[in-house]
Image: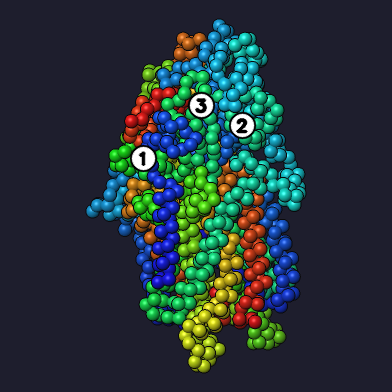
Amino acid sequence: MADVSNAAPVQRHEHPTAAIGSRAVRYLAALFVIVTLNFLLPRMMPGDPVMNIVGEEAYYGSGEVLDALRADLGLDEALHVQYGRYMTGLVTGDWGYSYLYLQPVRESITLHLRWTLALVLPSVVLAALLAALLGSIAAWKRSSRTDVGLSGAHLLIYSMPHYWLAMLLLFMFSFKLGWFPLGRATSAGASELPYLIDVGWHMFLPLLVVTAFKAAYDFLIVRNSVVSILGEDYVLMAQAKGLSGMAVLFRHALRNALAPLVTVTAIQFGMVLSGALLVEVVFSWPGMGTLIYDAIGARDYPLLQSAFLIIAICVLIANFIADVLYPYLDPRTR
Amino acid sequence: MRLASHVKTNRLAMVGMIILWVFILGAVFAQLLMPHDPWRHFVPFMSPSVTHVLGTDDVGRDIFSELILGARVSLTVGFMAGLIAVGIGVLVGLLAGFRRGYLDEILMGLTDVVLVIPALPLVILVSVYLGPGIWYTILVIGLVFWPSTARVIRSQVLSVRQSGYVESARALGAGDGWLMRRHVLPNVLPLILAKFVLTVAAAMLMEASLSFLGLGDPMAKSWGMMLHYAFARGGFIREMWWWYVPPGVCISLCILSLTLISFSIEEGSDPRLRRALDR
Amino acid sequence: MRILKPVLTLLAAVALLSSGTACTPEQPPTPTPDDPELPESCALVLRVGTTRDFKSTSKFADYWYGVLSNLTTHDSLIKLGPDMLPTPWLARDWTISDDSMTFTFTIAENATWHDGTPLTPRDVQFSIEYYRDRDPQAGWMQEIIESVSVDGNDVVLQLTRPYGNLLTEFMTYSIVPEHIWADVEKPLEYQGTDRVIGSGPFTFVSWDAAAGKYVFDANEDYFQGVPNISRVEFHVYRTMDALVMALSRGEVDTWWDYSGEFPYTHVPPLQDSGEIDFATATFLGVPAALGFNLDEGPTVDFDFRKAITLAINYDQIANLVYAGYGTAPTYGFVPPTHPHFNDDVPRIIYDKEQAAALLDSLGYVDSNGDGLREGQDGRNLRLTLLTRGDMPGTLRVTEMVAADLRAVGIDSNVRALDSSTWVATKDAKDYDLVFFRATPWGTMMHASHGSGYFDSRRTGAGVLHNLDAAEYLDACDARLSTALPEEQERLDRELQQLHYEYLPGIALVWIESLYPYREGWNDWTIDHIYGGVVNSFSWFTVTAD
């Protein structure tokens, strides 16, 4: 998801260590609000989760059966009681039972989180590497045909709806050419090495899409910061001192460009995580995106709460790390 | 204004402006440009022809006419949501920057919270809660995309406040209102504009994503909704590229033009601002 | 880009290599003699694609697996035959007392559970009691069933009141082993691996959630003989596009769904492939239906409802959304596939002029010339149309009805909601017109012929429960309390007539369903209720070249 407008990392010109303390407090407050929102938002939605369990044709008389089911799921209690149980459950690790996936929520989440991370982590790393390489090349050869080509291509990818590109690729490479499967994460039955190959084969296209979008964003950042660094005095000095172009690029420019790249990657991690949702839906990838999408449809409160919470915590941690790292990485504040 | 002249001299920005104007004009004069009534049923699943440049969809509607009407819906969503988001963001940023203290802490804390909640799942959740409807979509997107603007504006206000001449003006008894008009607004205006343009792009993408998931307004023919129907009603599997490629291209071109424009605003403004936008 | 190239080439090579080894596209029907688990002779594997939302192997908690298990691992006492009549299954015979209050089922003697334990009448007794006490879907049993007893090979049900629809109801409840479920307090949450054990024609082999694939093997000891197919796999796809691709690429042999029609939009690509044949059958349910709010608003007036029904262009819906496989319905709601279809009930005619005249006579006139009629209060007539946002076909129908209404001067406010919100809004009666669908089973439930959707005393996620006219409720009660065939026929016809006379809702279209399957497979049996060619009867008739 090219969620460009919210990509701004946290950065304020305050004293690093003092700032970290106050930031930590603020993050804890944010966490509390998120946890509470997580609890309230799904419950504010219209619709009764019990209806989804019994199916569209079930006759439930005057409703005693539904009441029993509701009681079974703890949905009949007052909101504050449910809230209390939810909070203690969070701390003790009892995240409730998913009536959609029919297993403890923690199991559903770990299962799906694993698939999402398998998709997102390599994408983030690959994208950063690709972007660092291509971005600095483009910046070095600024305004050349290479730069225009690379920048243009990345801008174009950056501008596309993710799912649309995913659909086009799925159609081209899976359906038309038959090189890749039509979706999901495995073909079942294999184990060990064949299993890994099988997963890699299923993963190729979704990975490509997520990487492409992350790389497009990273590329623009790397290119911009390398361009601005190349104009700084000390780089010009180094060049004047006779250092070769490549040495200047990699020793000075790229190293400095890594700072914004690392922070943006940290900030974006959660975004990419939630942004993989649409790509997952297109490729039937059994990750968090699919999980959240289904859980919203079925009003699976415990599952929704925990899924949101996990993603929010990931973003929170990433933000915090970026906050802490930024003053040390940014050459301008160092 | 310096900014305008910069946009003129920057070739890429010009390209962006031209693309955007084509779409805006298309949206405004949709009634004149549409060759057919976009609600009229012809023969379904027709291939492109002279009478139907992009063929017809699953219920026989002229795709080209729908595409033109789609510009109106998609751009409206983008611009309205962008306005709401930037409006809230500027208000929060200015308040937090000027008042400091508890208000600042609370507002920035709120900003952090909204920033941290993953946008797409939140928008999905709230859309399901409110139900589909173009104004709901606008409202939801607007309510989710304001925090980054608030942050940037706040830090800009802080740095303007800290500059020597403002501090001396303050010492001479200048009020907040005067400071805002005289020093802060001129400084943050290009920033607000750039943020606005970026937010419009994000809102358009978000609308397209929501519609794709089937959470858009089915009665509003946005590009996202066209894609939704193309995928849900067999356009994809029947290889009707003239149905599912044009809306995607239109969305991409709009986002591209908006991005190019925001970049040029960024480059045309002063370096301090550029740093603020980098983040 | 120069650096990228070798990397991409390498990855593509790995992908190609693995596509050659890990998943060779196979030409069905597939003899797989090298598979150790399958008997070498005449091993026939049927691979079925579905887009339904399978999550687990819990037949109690997972609605869709519950349906699937009734086709494969589990048996019910009786089944609805292809001829729409009750057919013996686990119960090889049954008798009904004259007062329709005592049902006696004679249980097949040679049935066994997949773990080798014999299936006894006691298991049947246990199952019925278990559903009654523990399954939220079987709440009706608590009101109806007085006692269940075993008498030799017979299981005798004593009812609290006459109940004519018991046989139909029991077609969907499969018998479960007492030795597994006796100690399970919460069947919805039971995680034991033995929850998949039944007595059906197939035994459960595996479920791979990440791959979305169920595998079932033929039950060699099945009491009705060994199925023609030695293995059946169900492959779950998230989208119809992916499923159609899989069908045309030969990854699956056919399609299964319960209560959904194969989308006509996706038929031509399969026809073009030249490898897919289609079986056709009249759909038992109603894929698109329109219900009225009978409690408040302008739709309370019968003539107003009548005007609405006249304003809709049914042929256009049948032709555009259902690709010409649809027909305009009658006012009786259910299609002619149903036994006791009442052909005296008139077909609904699209007649804009008559609709306009009727609206005029009701005082809804366009007096300010804006093209929209105003009510007595001078405000524009604007109806709230409640529909499902997650069903694109239904949305298209809604669009068309909205346009048809606009043509007779009625404005509409379309509320397209996801299923959960739709249910809540529908139950709050927060609509003028509601778009819904009737599943095959749904049209047979309650007093049959769609009455389950309209009887105001019913409850349920998919039903409208909007009609409380005494005449209608009495007819339902009479139908429910008789098991006499001629009495049932009379009441079935009456119910259809009453749908015409009270107009609680109408079908918008009846359809011919298409069931795609790969060439080379023959002799399918079509089952109207459990979804086309993949059903309990086909297991014993289907053959492959």
Mark 1 is surrounded, within 10 Å at the Cα level, by few (under 14), some (14 to 19) or many (20 or more) other residues, namely: few
Question: Where does label 1 land, which residue?
Answer: C27
Question: Where does label 2 land, which residue?
Answer: C195
Task: Give residue A57's position: percent from left, percent from top.
Answer: 54, 30
Q: Is the C terminus of chain B in the top left, top right, bottom left or bottom right quadrant?
A: bottom right
Question: Where does label 3 land, which residue?
Answer: C219
* Eye-nearest disc, 3 or 2: 3
Q: Is residue B253 left or right of residue B272?
A: left
The reply to whether label 1 and label 3 mark residues of one chain is yes
Determine the residue positioned at 46% across, 9% down. Answer: C486
Q: Inspect the image, locate mark 2, and give the three-letter code of the amino acid beneath it.
A: Arg
Mark 3 is surrounded, within 10 Å at the Cα level, by few (under 14), some (14 to 19) or many (20 or more) other residues, namely: many
The span from disc 2 to disc 1 (Cα, nearest Å) is 34 Å
Task: Give residue C239's position: percent from left, percent from top.
Answer: 45, 44
Task: Give residue B226's position: percent from left, percent from top.
Answer: 40, 51
Q: Is residue A148 left or right of residue C186?
A: left
The span from disc 1 to disc 3 (Cα, nearest Å) is 25 Å
Query: From this viewpoint, which residue is outermost toward the left?
Result: B50
The span from disc 3 to disc 2 (Cα, nearest Å) is 17 Å
SS category of the residue bearing label 1: loop
Q: Inspect the image, locate mark 3, and give the three-letter code of the amino acid beneath it.
A: Asn
